[in-house]
């Protein structure tokens, strides 16, 4: 297998066994990037020279038997809303075209210290909201990879990097993971330090990441949040079939036909393999969750941009501009009521999760849409960003047109170990062929 | 001395020495209440029978040598926005005229368990905001006692109870304490559980209390927050003259003439006794603090009442009604910006407090105003409610018309022990004759 195709776990084993060096891995990765980037446009900027230097240092360390962590020497893409010291960070906006941060985001610092190599910054929609990035879907160049973490998802899916950092305020990790046929995860709200990640709506913003396996998601979480979050999921637990709650109602009514059929087929496989799948009713407050979510989202996004917006309105792209304008009109009492609805929803989802290991729904309303005008609808993801519970998406099948479908698992807050265990078990059953044909 | 005149510390010593019983103390207190209440109107409701029963039980316990705490057998007034199980709790509003809570506020539970006797509920302005209570100032019946904790302040000042619970969102403890010539304290925001205290503006609401000495304030804090907050202030520390920061600027410019002269005179006495008093400049963000405070106050108050207000607008009194109406117009972006200003102000006040033990200002803009139409201006108190830092007010002198003046000390968050130590030292120097002539 080509080095660029390896998962983190596979590459890490080769590196620790002296059979692969960080430099060799990065060379393979850059070969891949250079070949596919003209078609995919996943990267805002690449830093081959800096990355090669880092990789060489890590190669020396590895040869001396000094391995910093399971991501020692692993190339990891970083979404362009994460501050990177000395490296341009554009937020996907002309307003930040020439912005070069003087420090690293906390998460960037953490992965660097753990031995990650950062080949470059990945494309994002404007300010991680709705104005699309130029990135294309590796499964079909005519389709969107989803957003807002468009470049990170496309880069991991196409074999450019084994993992990448993304962020999610509505569905910006889970949806592109589903559209691109890879694993996406956003841990519990506030579990991972957001310092240095440009805010979109701070009550809803989550750090997240993309990988090609659940095992790699666990490695990423270990590095970003510390072992305590994942240790529950010792491999032996994964051999126990999970108890899953299937949410129908809103999800079934609004899902694209192939999305729901894909979910039913996946659920059937999981049942056949021994999973217990219960029909779990949606909590009462679910009815107002999207409205409340939108009020918080709009208010906080408007608040972040308020001053700049008054001076430079025309430099915002269309969707962000109307989003901020709308947010400036929300009354504080509506914002505060939305916050109270959030409190109620959190309690009700907690109650819902008492009887099951996690609940499942489709990862997206539709498969990846044709055209790059829209990155798709986050409606199946935003409720979990709203309550802040941990979510992971696995690829679970393909549409007739060979576009990936995803299954979304939501677990208990700060119990990502259990969520990863259940997802790991399901991954073994679903056996998704997670590689698109080369575009 | 009459029993009703005793401080908590004095009464507690007599009770533990078997020289006074909780029943005797309560009888003395009720004698006092019955004599003065027609003139002062400090109480919404009295529960003599229930209180006597409680006092008798505590008397038996005391005789058996079982003393629950330093407030064992001490009568403590409770502001009528604190939920009291089975006892009418009106919030000073016709809307809650007949409301009888089914549980005690956390604080009420705590003082009851510590052996407090609750003779009744004290008058509050409507919803602890600006529409006045009927209560009069014990120093001069033609004047307001201040508010919103009007009844609690008047009751402690006039010798009806040695201590009472109040609450502060702007200046609702410190201002009436100053107007009534007693000690008032509001500890750090969130230090004391607000559960069961009817919210006015939850980001700004504080539990607070009135006593007749700093020693009693420490006893109250010990009971409400647990010893850890006060243990720093072991008596020996109080013998060390504190380092105080005098804030002029806004305060000097806006203070009533007698208020500022009173403060200067008090500062002079403190200096003569050995305190170091530095001139401390106001932080930069102070300029926007009142505006930001008002936005948060109005937004949250409107949010609390929104639904009820739409149905029963006419049942709100005038000031609360216009407050809610105004709050409903605040945009969320303004609310959120005010919250950010708060963050900045907190940092700047923390920096300010690095060089001193606490900062001092007058406790109120004016002495107690003539007439009952207004409870006075909270402008000297609301900045400290905004940042949530602990505050204590001591009486420090009298105006020509024999109305009390107060001095306000603001300390570091969660360091109430140090604040109490400094205030205790100053109390010893200022030697305020804290008893008004009987009205």
Image (cartoon, coloured by chain):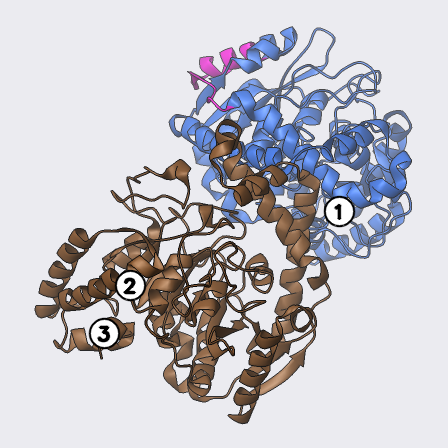
Chain colours: A blue, B brown
Observer-nearest of A104 and A341: A341
Which residue is under mark 2?
B36
**B45 is higher (above) or lower (below) than B273:** above
Expressed as whole percent of the image width and height from the top left, the position of residue B150 reads: 42, 58
Same chain? Circles 1 and 2: no
SS class of the residue under badge 3?
A: helix
Which label belongs to residue A21? 1
Residue at the image position 36 percent from the left and 43 percent from the top: B90
The N terminus of chain B: image quadrant: bottom left
Residue A276 part of the magenta segment: yes
Residue at the image position 44 percent from the left and 75 percent from the top: B420
SS class of the residue under badge 1?
A: loop
Task: Determine whether, in the image, residue B351 is placed left or right of residue A358.
Answer: right
Residue A2 visible in the displayed image: no
Observer-nearest of A275 and B377: B377
Task: Determine whether, in the image, residue B420 is placed left or right of residue A3.
Answer: left
Which residue is under mark 3?
B11
């Amino acid at each position: 297998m080509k080095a660029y195709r390896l998962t983190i776990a596979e590459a890490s084993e080769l590196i620790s066994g002296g059979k692969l060096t960080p430099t060799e891995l990065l060379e393979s990765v850059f070969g891949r990037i250079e070949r596919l980037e003209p078609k995919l446009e996943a990267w805002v900027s690449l830093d081959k020279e800096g990355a090669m230097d880092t990789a060489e240092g890590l190669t020396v360390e590895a040869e001396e038997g000094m391995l910093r962590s399971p991501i020692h020497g692993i190339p990891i893409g970083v979404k362009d809303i994460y501050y990177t010291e000395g490296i341009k960070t554009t937020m996907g906006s002309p307003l930040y075209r020439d912005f070069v941060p003087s420090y690293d985001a906390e998460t960037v610092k953490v992965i660097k210290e753990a031995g990650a190599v950062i080949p470059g910054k990945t494309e994002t929609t404007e300010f991680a909201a709705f104005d699309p990035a130029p990135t294309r879907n590796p499964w079909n160049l005519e389709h969107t990879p989803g957003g807002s973490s468009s470049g990170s998802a496309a880069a991991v899916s196409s074999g450019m990097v084994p993992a990448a950092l993304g962020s999610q305020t509505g569905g910006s990790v889970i949806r592109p993971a589903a559209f691109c046929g890879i694993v996406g995860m956003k841990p519990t709200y506030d579990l991972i330090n957001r310092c240095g990640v440009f805010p979109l709506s701070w009550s809803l913003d989550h750090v997240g990441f993309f990988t090609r396996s659940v095992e790699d998601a666990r490695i990423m979480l270990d590095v970003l949040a510390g072992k305590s979050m994942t240790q529950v999921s010792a491999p032996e637990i994964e051999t126990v079939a999970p108890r899953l709650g299937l949410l129908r109602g809103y999800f079934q009514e609004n899902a694209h036909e192939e999305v729901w059929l894909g979910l039913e087929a996946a659920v059937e496989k999981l049942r056949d393999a021994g999973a217990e799948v219960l029909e779990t009713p949606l909590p009462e407050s679910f009815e107002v969750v999207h409205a409340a979510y939108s009020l918080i989202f709009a208010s906080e996004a408007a608040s972040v941009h308020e001053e700049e917006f008054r001076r430079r309105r025309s430099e915002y792209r269309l969707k962000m501009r109307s989003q901020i304008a709308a947010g400036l009109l929300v009354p504080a009492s509506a914002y505060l009521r939305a916050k109270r609805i959030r409190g109620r929803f959190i309690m009700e989802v907690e109650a819902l999760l008492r009887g099951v290991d996690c609940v499942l729904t489709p990862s997206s309303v539709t498969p990846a849409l044709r055209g790059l005008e829209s990155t798709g609808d986050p409606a199946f993801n935003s409720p979990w960003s709203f309550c802040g519970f941990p979510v992971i998406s696995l690829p679970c099948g393909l549409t007739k047109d060979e576009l990936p479908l995803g299954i979304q698992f939501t677990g208990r807050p700060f119990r990502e170990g259990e969520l990863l265990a259940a997802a790991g078990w399901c991954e073994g059953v679903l056996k998704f062929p997670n590689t698109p044909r080369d575009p």
